Amino acid sequence: MWGRVTASVAAAFVVVAAMTPAPDGPAVRAAPVDVHWIVECDQVGTAHIDPILNPGGSWPHLHTFGGNPAVHASSTAGQLFEAGSGCKDSADRSAYWQPTLVDEAGRPVVPESFRAYYRAGEVDPQLVEPAPFGLRLVAGDPMATSRQPLDIDHLCVGTSYGLVESVHDTAVDCGPGELLRSDVEFPQCWDGVDLWREGAAHMAYPRGGECPAAHPVAIPQLSLEASYAEGSTYEGMGFEGGLSPYGLHADAILAWDPGEMETLVEGCLNAFRVCGDVTDEVRPFSGADRRGTLPLPTVPDVPAAGSAPTGHG
Protein backbone atom coordinates (compact mmCIF):
# COMPACT_ATOMS: atom_id res chain seq x y z
CA MET A 1 0.00 0.00 0.00
CA TRP A 2 2.98 2.31 0.41
CA GLY A 3 4.05 1.98 -3.23
CA ARG A 4 7.43 1.28 -4.74
CA VAL A 5 10.68 2.74 -3.48
CA THR A 6 13.12 4.28 -5.92
CA ALA A 7 16.65 2.93 -6.21
CA SER A 8 18.07 6.11 -4.70
CA VAL A 9 15.90 5.80 -1.61
CA ALA A 10 16.69 2.12 -1.22
CA ALA A 11 20.39 3.00 -1.29
CA ALA A 12 20.03 5.63 1.43
CA PHE A 13 20.30 3.23 4.35
CA VAL A 14 23.47 1.77 2.78
CA VAL A 15 25.00 5.26 2.85
CA VAL A 16 24.05 5.71 6.50
CA ALA A 17 25.55 2.35 7.44
CA ALA A 18 28.77 3.20 5.62
CA MET A 19 29.15 6.75 6.96
CA THR A 20 28.05 6.54 10.59
CA PRO A 21 31.27 6.94 12.63
CA ALA A 22 32.06 3.76 14.55
CA PRO A 23 33.74 3.27 17.92
CA ASP A 24 37.35 2.24 18.34
CA GLY A 25 36.63 -1.24 19.65
CA PRO A 26 38.84 -1.94 22.69
CA ALA A 27 39.63 1.78 23.02
CA VAL A 28 36.05 2.55 24.01
CA ARG A 29 35.58 2.29 27.77
CA ALA A 30 32.51 2.59 29.93
CA ALA A 31 31.90 5.13 32.65
CA PRO A 32 32.73 3.82 36.17
CA VAL A 33 29.02 3.69 37.09
CA ASP A 34 26.17 2.95 34.68
CA VAL A 35 24.11 5.99 35.63
CA HIS A 36 20.90 6.20 33.63
CA TRP A 37 17.19 6.71 33.44
CA ILE A 38 14.68 4.51 31.59
CA VAL A 39 11.35 5.25 29.97
CA GLU A 40 9.02 2.46 28.85
CA CYS A 41 6.93 3.05 25.73
CA ASP A 42 4.13 1.22 23.94
CA GLN A 43 4.55 -0.62 20.66
CA VAL A 44 2.26 1.29 18.32
CA GLY A 45 2.32 -0.52 14.96
CA THR A 46 4.19 -1.47 11.80
CA ALA A 47 4.58 0.23 8.43
CA HIS A 48 6.84 0.39 5.35
CA ILE A 49 8.00 3.90 6.21
CA ASP A 50 11.10 5.68 7.56
CA PRO A 51 10.37 9.29 8.59
CA ILE A 52 14.11 10.07 8.77
CA LEU A 53 15.54 8.55 5.61
CA ASN A 54 12.53 9.00 3.32
CA PRO A 55 9.99 11.37 4.83
CA GLY A 56 6.65 11.20 3.09
CA GLY A 57 7.50 8.09 1.10
CA SER A 58 7.68 4.33 1.46
CA TRP A 59 10.54 2.14 2.65
CA PRO A 60 11.66 -1.28 1.38
CA HIS A 61 11.41 -3.12 4.69
CA LEU A 62 8.86 -3.13 7.48
CA HIS A 63 9.49 -1.19 10.70
CA THR A 64 7.91 -1.65 14.11
CA PHE A 65 7.30 1.66 15.88
CA GLY A 66 7.23 2.45 19.58
CA GLY A 67 6.54 5.58 21.58
CA ASN A 68 4.50 8.25 19.88
CA PRO A 69 1.25 6.74 18.54
CA ALA A 70 0.79 9.48 15.92
CA VAL A 71 3.99 8.72 13.99
CA HIS A 72 3.61 8.70 10.20
CA ALA A 73 5.81 8.85 7.11
CA SER A 74 6.31 12.62 7.32
CA SER A 75 6.58 13.01 11.09
CA THR A 76 8.65 15.85 12.49
CA ALA A 77 9.57 16.44 16.11
CA GLY A 78 7.18 19.36 16.35
CA GLN A 79 4.27 17.29 15.08
CA LEU A 80 5.13 14.46 17.44
CA PHE A 81 5.25 16.81 20.40
CA GLU A 82 1.84 18.23 19.60
CA ALA A 83 0.36 14.72 19.20
CA GLY A 84 1.08 13.50 22.73
CA SER A 85 2.99 10.53 24.11
CA GLY A 86 2.93 6.74 24.10
CA CYS A 87 5.43 6.49 26.98
CA LYS A 88 4.98 6.17 30.74
CA ASP A 89 6.73 9.50 31.14
CA SER A 90 4.50 11.66 28.96
CA ALA A 91 7.29 14.21 28.61
CA ASP A 92 8.85 11.76 26.14
CA ARG A 93 6.99 12.22 22.87
CA SER A 94 9.71 10.67 20.74
CA ALA A 95 9.24 8.07 18.02
CA TYR A 96 11.43 4.96 18.10
CA TRP A 97 11.55 2.19 15.50
CA GLN A 98 13.41 -0.91 14.32
CA PRO A 99 13.00 -3.54 11.58
CA THR A 100 10.19 -6.04 12.06
CA LEU A 101 10.91 -9.71 12.62
CA VAL A 102 8.86 -12.04 10.41
CA ASP A 103 8.22 -15.77 10.62
CA GLU A 104 8.66 -18.27 7.77
CA ALA A 105 5.26 -17.32 6.39
CA GLY A 106 6.19 -13.64 6.32
CA ARG A 107 3.92 -12.73 9.22
CA PRO A 108 5.16 -9.89 11.44
CA VAL A 109 6.32 -10.79 14.94
CA VAL A 110 6.41 -7.60 16.97
CA PRO A 111 7.83 -6.78 20.41
CA GLU A 112 5.45 -6.17 23.27
CA SER A 113 7.11 -2.94 24.37
CA PHE A 114 10.11 -0.68 23.98
CA ARG A 115 12.38 0.58 26.75
CA ALA A 116 14.61 3.55 26.04
CA TYR A 117 17.69 3.69 28.26
CA TYR A 118 19.39 7.09 28.51
CA ARG A 119 22.87 6.57 29.96
CA ALA A 120 25.99 8.55 30.68
CA GLY A 121 27.56 5.86 28.53
CA GLU A 122 31.25 6.05 27.75
CA VAL A 123 32.04 9.62 28.82
CA ASP A 124 32.34 11.51 32.10
CA PRO A 125 28.73 11.80 33.36
CA GLN A 126 29.34 15.39 34.44
CA LEU A 127 30.01 16.34 30.81
CA VAL A 128 26.73 15.03 29.41
CA GLU A 129 24.40 17.73 28.07
CA PRO A 130 20.68 17.47 27.25
CA ALA A 131 19.92 16.04 23.83
CA PRO A 132 18.49 18.75 21.55
CA PHE A 133 14.81 18.69 20.67
CA GLY A 134 14.34 17.23 17.18
CA LEU A 135 17.61 15.29 17.02
CA ARG A 136 17.41 12.38 14.56
CA LEU A 137 19.38 9.25 15.32
CA VAL A 138 20.19 6.06 13.44
CA ALA A 139 22.31 3.09 14.49
CA GLY A 140 23.18 -0.30 13.06
CA ASP A 141 23.75 -1.70 9.59
CA PRO A 142 20.61 -3.07 7.90
CA MET A 143 22.80 -4.69 5.25
CA ALA A 144 25.04 -6.60 7.68
CA THR A 145 25.61 -10.27 6.80
CA SER A 146 27.60 -11.14 9.94
CA ARG A 147 27.92 -9.94 13.53
CA GLN A 148 27.92 -6.18 13.77
CA PRO A 149 30.88 -4.56 15.55
CA LEU A 150 28.71 -2.26 17.64
CA ASP A 151 26.62 -3.01 20.71
CA ILE A 152 23.74 -4.30 18.57
CA ASP A 153 22.53 -7.68 19.77
CA HIS A 154 19.70 -10.05 20.52
CA LEU A 155 19.65 -11.14 24.16
CA CYS A 156 18.01 -13.87 26.19
CA VAL A 157 16.87 -12.31 29.45
CA GLY A 158 15.59 -14.09 32.55
CA THR A 159 12.07 -13.01 33.44
CA SER A 160 12.56 -13.56 37.19
CA TYR A 161 15.49 -11.22 37.80
CA GLY A 162 15.95 -9.49 34.45
CA LEU A 163 19.50 -10.82 34.06
CA VAL A 164 21.04 -11.32 30.62
CA GLU A 165 21.55 -15.06 30.19
CA SER A 166 23.14 -15.06 26.72
CA VAL A 167 23.98 -12.73 23.80
CA HIS A 168 23.31 -13.58 20.13
CA ASP A 169 23.93 -12.13 16.67
CA THR A 170 20.43 -12.97 15.44
CA ALA A 171 17.00 -13.81 16.88
CA VAL A 172 16.99 -17.13 18.75
CA ASP A 173 14.76 -19.28 20.94
CA CYS A 174 15.38 -18.47 24.60
CA GLY A 175 14.91 -21.09 27.30
CA PRO A 176 12.03 -21.49 29.75
CA GLY A 177 11.60 -18.48 31.98
CA GLU A 178 13.44 -16.23 29.51
CA LEU A 179 12.42 -13.73 26.85
CA LEU A 180 14.05 -12.44 23.69
CA ARG A 181 15.19 -8.81 23.68
CA SER A 182 16.90 -6.76 20.99
CA ASP A 183 19.32 -4.03 22.03
CA VAL A 184 20.62 -1.20 19.81
CA GLU A 185 23.07 1.40 21.14
CA PHE A 186 23.14 4.77 19.39
CA PRO A 187 26.11 7.14 19.01
CA GLN A 188 26.21 9.80 21.74
CA CYS A 189 28.62 12.44 20.42
CA TRP A 190 26.92 15.30 18.58
CA ASP A 191 28.46 17.98 16.35
CA GLY A 192 26.61 20.61 18.38
CA VAL A 193 24.99 22.17 15.31
CA ASP A 194 22.92 19.85 13.14
CA LEU A 195 19.82 17.86 14.01
CA TRP A 196 20.43 15.70 10.94
CA ARG A 197 23.15 15.43 8.32
CA GLU A 198 23.34 13.15 5.32
CA GLY A 199 24.74 9.79 6.31
CA ALA A 200 24.15 10.55 10.01
CA ALA A 201 27.40 12.52 9.90
CA HIS A 202 26.21 14.79 12.73
CA MET A 203 26.78 11.95 15.25
CA ALA A 204 29.71 9.76 16.30
CA TYR A 205 30.59 7.21 18.95
CA PRO A 206 33.05 8.11 21.74
CA ARG A 207 36.70 7.23 21.29
CA GLY A 208 38.76 6.29 24.30
CA GLY A 209 36.07 7.57 26.64
CA GLU A 210 35.86 10.98 25.00
CA CYS A 211 33.93 12.55 22.16
CA PRO A 212 36.01 13.29 19.03
CA ALA A 213 36.85 16.90 18.15
CA ALA A 214 34.40 17.04 15.24
CA HIS A 215 31.58 15.84 17.54
CA PRO A 216 32.44 17.49 20.86
CA VAL A 217 29.04 17.50 22.62
CA ALA A 218 28.24 14.44 24.74
CA ILE A 219 24.51 13.77 25.02
CA PRO A 220 22.80 10.88 26.81
CA GLN A 221 23.65 7.57 25.17
CA LEU A 222 20.36 6.08 23.96
CA SER A 223 19.98 2.32 23.96
CA LEU A 224 16.70 1.04 22.55
CA GLU A 225 15.50 -2.29 23.92
CA ALA A 226 12.56 -4.18 22.42
CA SER A 227 11.16 -7.12 24.42
CA TYR A 228 9.30 -10.03 22.83
CA ALA A 229 6.79 -12.42 24.37
CA GLU A 230 8.15 -15.05 26.72
CA GLY A 231 7.97 -18.62 25.44
CA SER A 232 7.57 -17.77 21.75
CA THR A 233 9.70 -19.28 19.00
CA TYR A 234 12.10 -17.04 17.09
CA GLU A 235 14.82 -19.41 15.80
CA GLY A 236 15.49 -18.80 12.11
CA MET A 237 13.41 -15.64 11.89
CA GLY A 238 14.66 -12.73 9.86
CA PHE A 239 13.58 -9.27 8.85
CA GLU A 240 11.05 -8.42 6.19
CA GLY A 241 12.13 -6.78 2.92
CA GLY A 242 15.13 -8.92 2.08
CA LEU A 243 17.35 -7.95 5.02
CA SER A 244 19.60 -10.60 6.50
CA PRO A 245 18.93 -11.84 10.05
CA TYR A 246 22.02 -9.82 11.11
CA GLY A 247 20.53 -6.50 9.95
CA LEU A 248 19.23 -5.23 13.29
CA HIS A 249 19.17 -1.42 13.44
CA ALA A 250 17.09 1.35 14.97
CA ASP A 251 16.06 4.96 14.49
CA ALA A 252 14.67 7.71 16.70
CA ILE A 253 13.30 11.22 16.42
CA LEU A 254 13.77 12.79 19.86
CA ALA A 255 10.82 14.91 20.95
CA TRP A 256 11.28 15.19 24.73
CA ASP A 257 9.90 18.14 26.60
CA PRO A 258 13.10 20.26 26.85
CA GLY A 259 12.58 21.01 30.54
CA GLU A 260 12.16 17.35 31.43
CA MET A 261 15.21 16.37 29.37
CA GLU A 262 17.26 18.96 31.27
CA THR A 263 15.85 17.81 34.62
CA LEU A 264 16.78 14.17 33.99
CA VAL A 265 20.26 14.90 32.64
CA GLU A 266 21.13 17.08 35.61
CA GLY A 267 19.35 14.99 38.26
CA CYS A 268 20.42 11.55 37.04
CA LEU A 269 23.48 11.62 34.80
CA ASN A 270 25.36 14.71 35.96
CA ALA A 271 24.64 13.73 39.57
CA PHE A 272 25.95 10.14 39.11
CA ARG A 273 22.53 8.78 40.07
CA VAL A 274 20.96 5.52 38.84
CA CYS A 275 17.37 6.69 38.41
CA GLY A 276 15.82 3.60 36.84
CA ASP A 277 12.29 3.84 35.45
CA VAL A 278 10.71 7.28 35.24
CA THR A 279 6.97 7.79 34.86
CA ASP A 280 4.44 10.56 35.37
CA GLU A 281 3.75 9.15 38.84
CA VAL A 282 7.24 8.16 39.98
CA ARG A 283 10.04 10.71 40.11
CA PRO A 284 13.50 9.25 40.64
CA PHE A 285 14.81 12.09 42.81
CA SER A 286 13.59 15.08 44.74
CA GLY A 287 13.74 18.48 43.15
CA ALA A 288 11.97 20.65 40.63
CA ASP A 289 10.47 19.07 37.53
CA ARG A 290 10.99 21.59 34.75
CA ARG A 291 8.74 20.07 32.11
CA GLY A 292 6.89 22.75 30.23
CA THR A 293 9.11 25.54 31.53
CA LEU A 294 11.57 25.64 28.62
CA PRO A 295 10.34 26.74 25.18
CA LEU A 296 10.56 24.48 22.15
CA PRO A 297 13.02 25.61 19.45
CA THR A 298 11.40 28.04 17.03
CA VAL A 299 12.47 25.87 14.06
CA PRO A 300 12.60 22.32 15.49
CA ASP A 301 12.14 20.30 12.30
CA VAL A 302 14.64 19.25 9.67
CA PRO A 303 14.46 18.21 6.01
CA ALA A 304 15.73 14.72 5.26
CA ALA A 305 18.53 15.61 2.87
CA GLY A 306 19.87 18.67 4.63
CA SER A 307 20.62 19.96 8.09
CA ALA A 308 19.15 22.39 10.55
CA PRO A 309 21.12 24.41 13.10
CA THR A 310 19.92 24.44 16.70
CA GLY A 311 21.84 27.43 17.97
CA HIS A 312 23.71 25.23 20.47
CA GLY A 313 26.29 27.27 22.30
Image: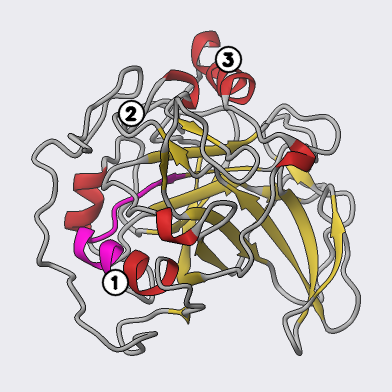
Q: Secondary structure at mark 2?
A: loop
Q: Pointer 3 and pointer 1: residues touching (CB < 8 Å)?
A: no
Q: Is 75 displayed left or right of 29 in the figure?
A: left
Q: Which residues are magenta?
A: 252-263
The mark closer to the camera, 1 or 2, is: 1
Q: Residue at x 32, y 54 (%)?
A: 130
Q: Which residue is mark 1?
A: 90
Residue type marked 1: Ser
The mark closer to the camera, 3 or 1, is: 1
Q: Quadrant of residue 293?
A: bottom left
Q: How is the image coloured?
A: secondary structure
Circle nearer the N terminus (2, 3): 3
Q: CA distance from mark 2 to mark 3?
A: 17 Å
Residue type marked 3: Ala
Q: Is 34 displayed left or right of 283 in the figure?
A: right
Is residue 286 a member of the stretch shown in magenta?
no
Q: Which residue is mark 2?
A: 56
Q: Which residue is mark 3?
A: 11
Instruction: Pick whichever, 163 or 169, lies toward us.
Output: 163
Label 1 Cα crowd, 10 Å radius (few <14 / some 14-19 / many 20+):
many
Instruction: Pick whichever, 219 or 82, lies toward us.
Output: 219
Q: Secondary structure at mark 3?
A: loop
Circle nearer the N terminus (3, 1): 3
